[in-house]
Amino acid sequence: MSEEINIAGQLKFASQHLFNLIVFIGILYYFLKDIVVKFFSSRSLKISKEIQEANAVIETSQEAYNISSQKISLIDSELTELRNSIDLTTNRKTSEIIDNANIIAKKIKTDTEDIIKLESLRLKLEVESIILEKSLEIAKLEIRKEINDEKDIQLISSFLSEVKQNAISNS
Amino acid sequence: MPSATVNDFFIALTSEASSKENLEKVYLGLSNFVRAFDNDKNIRLCLINDIYPSAVKNDLISQIVSECESTRKFLEVIIEFNLLKSFVESREFFLKKLRKLLGKVKIEVVTVNVSQKDKLDFIKSQLEGIWGTNLELSFKENQEILGGIVLQVEDKYFDGSILGKVNELKKINIKGEFNV
């Protein structure tokens, strides 16, 4: 029985409070409706404005980005061209340098061969000359040993006869 | 006005000494002068240097060529005309000219030994057989020629020495080919 009283009391209590709440909400709605609507309207406007500004910024940025992208792609293509050109020039220069180096190397080789030939010829002639000098020195020593007055007079006589013959034929 | 040259005075000298005997004296005088000039440095310096007066030079010349008056006068004149240097530079030319007038041939003989009279007589007789008896012979000794004879006959040079033959061999290389 007491439980039934309690439930009825509770329902009553709840319905009173519900009523109070509804009244409170109605008062609130009545007094705050315009303010809240105004607030949210202004907020909505502000947000939409901000969104527009953001969109404008995004568009500007997009344009700047596009321009930058175009520039970057242009720079990139120029860089590629430049790189290709550098590569070509480098290759051409390298091949020129290698060709020149080859030519110089060939020339040096030829010159060196010539120098070696000439030097060996010079040394050969020098050696021959030294041998000849030594041989003649030995010959002089031998002649000095062999020569005597008789042979000397014979030599002089023979030479003077030759001179006489020449003098006769010239005159 | 053109000035006189040594040659002008020389022609005058040879014309004046017309006889062969006089020419011979002139030649001897000039030869003595040239020899003294070549060999004695003091004589050379005195005659060439302008600081010495002409009288000193003339005294010196008269001492060198006392035998021949014409030669002395000739030398005095060329000193007077400041032509001694030209004469000295061309001395061999003028002596040669005189030798030609005298029919004389100057021969310088080089041998290894000049002490053997027989050899020198033999050479002299041989040379007389070629260039006649009017020779102005001088002998020089040079051991370096090894043997044979070298002749300087006026401007001509005859090499019949062993050294000359050896030097000719130098023109032939080891293969036996001539280098020239």
Image: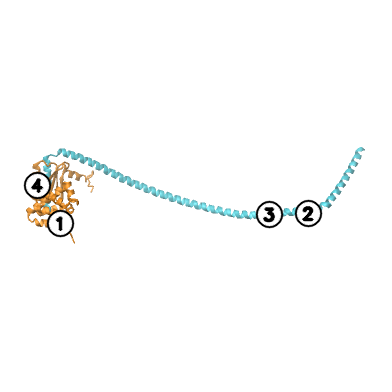
For the point 81% across and 52% down, which residue is it? A33
**Quadrant of the image for the C terminus of chain A?**
bottom left
Q: Chain of mark 3?
A: A
Relative image position of residue B5 (x, y in whole percent): 16, 57
Residues tagged 1 and 2 counted as in contact (Cβ below 8 A)? no
Q: Amino acid at mark 3?
A: Asn
Q: Which residue is under mark 4?
A: B126
Residues tagged 4 and 2 counted as in contact (Cβ below 8 A)? no
Residues tagged 3 and 2 counted as in contact (Cβ below 8 A)? no
Q: Amino acid at mark 4?
A: Gln
Residue A27 in sight in this render:
yes
Q: Which residue is under mark 3?
A: A55
Q: Chain of mark 4?
A: B
Secondary structure at badge 4 equals helix
Q: Chain A: what color?
A: cyan
Chain corresponding to orange in the figure: B
